[in-house]
Image: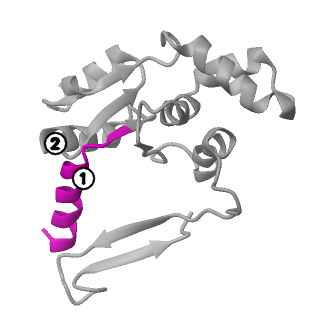
């Protein structure tokens, strides 16, 4: 394992942040969540049907998913509260209370609202959703800082062969 990755994991453990995963029943997301929980890298909120998440975790031999908070977006006890807040943020753009209530059942919107409400520090999504679909709720709910009109994404690739990149680490930006 690269020193870069070890440093990232160590820093994440120290910060003890909470990450919401709106694609909570997606298999790769669940496997990653299991590793994160096992290694105590972050606290995790999985959004999805509890029965589906637990069944998939059992099928894949994942032992740590029970440590995650699992939130069913359609039956979430704070759904109406979050819908009221979303409506307040978007009514000037023509959103109705009914639309806000429906949108909060969308895991991507619910995940961003959890960040807005201080329940989570960040979100990871995009395994089964397009980048635009992931970013739209963030732009509508959290927004960018004043004066910031452009966002950018990046990912790291870590190679076993260190002759690639900088000691085996390469950064790719704006790939979506």
Pick the residue in front: 3 or 65: 3
Is 116 rendered above or below residue 98?
A: below
Q: Which mark is residue 12?
A: 1
Q: Position of residue 13 (x, y in %)?
A: 19, 49
Residue visible at 49% across and 48% down? 126
Q: Is residue 93 above or below residue 167?
A: above
Left or right: 153 as drawn, with respect to 146: left
Residue 51 lies left or right of residue 112; in this view the side is left
Instruction: Measure the alpha-carbon separation of dots 2 and 1.
Output: 9 Å
Q: Which residue is mark 2?
A: 40
Residue plotted at (38% across, 31% down): 24
> Which secondary structure lies at badge 2?
loop
Q: Residues within 10 Å of mark 2 (few under 14, many from 20)?
A: some
Q: Is residue 110 left or right of residue 49?
A: right
Please say whether residue 102 is visible from this viewpoint: no
The secondary structure making up most of the magenta span is helix
Image quadrant in which you'd find residue 53: top left
> Which residue is located at x 30 percent, y 34 percent?
44
Query: In terms of sequence position, does the residue under pointer 2 or pointer 1 come before the other?
Result: 1
Vertical order, 44 against 172 (above or below):
above
Secondary structure beneath dot 1 equals helix
Residue 131 falls inside the magenta stretch: no
Q: Can you tell which quarter of the image residue 121 is in?
A: top left
**Residue drawn at x 35%, y 78% as measured from the top left:** 170
């Amino acid at each position: 394992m690269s020193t870069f990755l070890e440093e990232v994991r160590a820093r994440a453990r120290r910060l003890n942040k909470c990450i919401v995963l709106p694609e909570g029943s997606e298999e790769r997301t669940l496997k990653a969540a299991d590793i994160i929980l096992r290694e105590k890298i972050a606290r995790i909120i999985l959004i999805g049907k509890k029965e589906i998440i637990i069944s998939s975790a059992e099928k894949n031999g994942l032992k740590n998913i029970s440590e995650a908070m699992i939130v069913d977006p359609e039956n979430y006890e704070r759904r109406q509260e979050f819908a009221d807040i979303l409506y307040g943020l978007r009514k000037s753009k023509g959103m109705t209370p009914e639309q806000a209530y429906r949108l909060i059942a969308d895991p991507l919107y619910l995940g961003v609202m959890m960040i807005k409400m201080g329940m989570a520090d960040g979100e990871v999504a995009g395994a089964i959703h397009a980048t635009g679909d992931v970013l739209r709720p963030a732009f509508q709910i959290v927004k960018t800082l004043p004066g910031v009109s452009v966002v950018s994404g990046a990912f790291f690739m870590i190679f076993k062969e260190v002759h690639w990149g900088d000691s085996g680490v390469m950064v790719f930006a704006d790939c979506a």
